[in-house]
Amino acid sequence: MKPFEDDIVKCVEVLQEGGIILYPTDTVWGIGCDATNAEAVLKIYALKKRSDEKSMIVLLSDEKDIIKYVTQPDPKIFDYIKGIHKPTTFIYEGGVGLAENMIQADGTIAIRITGDAFCKQLIRRFGKPVVSTSANISGYPPPAFFEDIDIEIKNGVDYIVQHRQDDQAAALPSAIVKLNIDGSLTIIRP
């Protein structure tokens, strides 16, 4: 349990300083930063060589926190979240309280409630949402395992989490669902 705790402490320190981390999520390995820090978010876009028109995901530890970052969350979404078992990212209208470069031009924001124990603990200790984007250069497939992460990514972050580096369980990106203004759902990635 000691490496898990050490990683949490070090990640919180790096996030508070505006740095970026490489960490395991409930899906693939991710690159993360403070989702309320626009300069930190820019560092991730630069490292991934990614256009800032492409959105990144915000991870939260608890569904009750959605109301802090979305202007009008539909109460039905909470029932839907409880009923799913696959990691699912929801795109909400009216993102607020996050770095301006995390909210898309149309006002939407992508949020996932993490089911991963490490991520939950990290977000709770940090006290803010954390960015999660796959640990790859834009245009390349997300790495299935830690060992598949490009050296450029590993060298470009401020801290690499030790926890789960040897995990060989198959990892897939989350499903993506858009919550429409009328309360209906549109499946973007099953």
Image: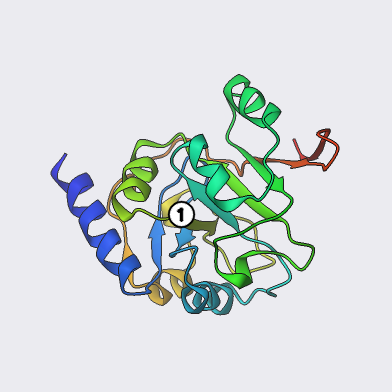
Quadrant for the N terminus in the image:
top left
Residue closer to the observer: 85 or 99: 99
Query: How many circles with numbers are drawn on the protein?
Result: 1
Is 152 rendered above or below residue 120? Answer: below
Callout 1: helix, strand or loop?
A: loop
Q: Measured from the top left, where is residue 39 in percent x and y?
A: 49, 79
Residue 126 higher or lower than 82, as above or below: below
Horizontal arrangement in the rendering, residue 83 relative to residue 17 (left or right): right
Reply above or below: 60 against 140.
above
Task: Say whether residue 121 is visible.
Answer: yes
Residue at 13 percent of width and 44 percent of height: 2
Under mark 1, the amino acid is: Pro
Furthest residue toward front: 72
162 left or right of 99 in image:
left
Residue under numbered circle 1: 129
Q: How is the image coloured?
A: rainbow
Horizontal and vertical percent position of residue 159: 31, 67
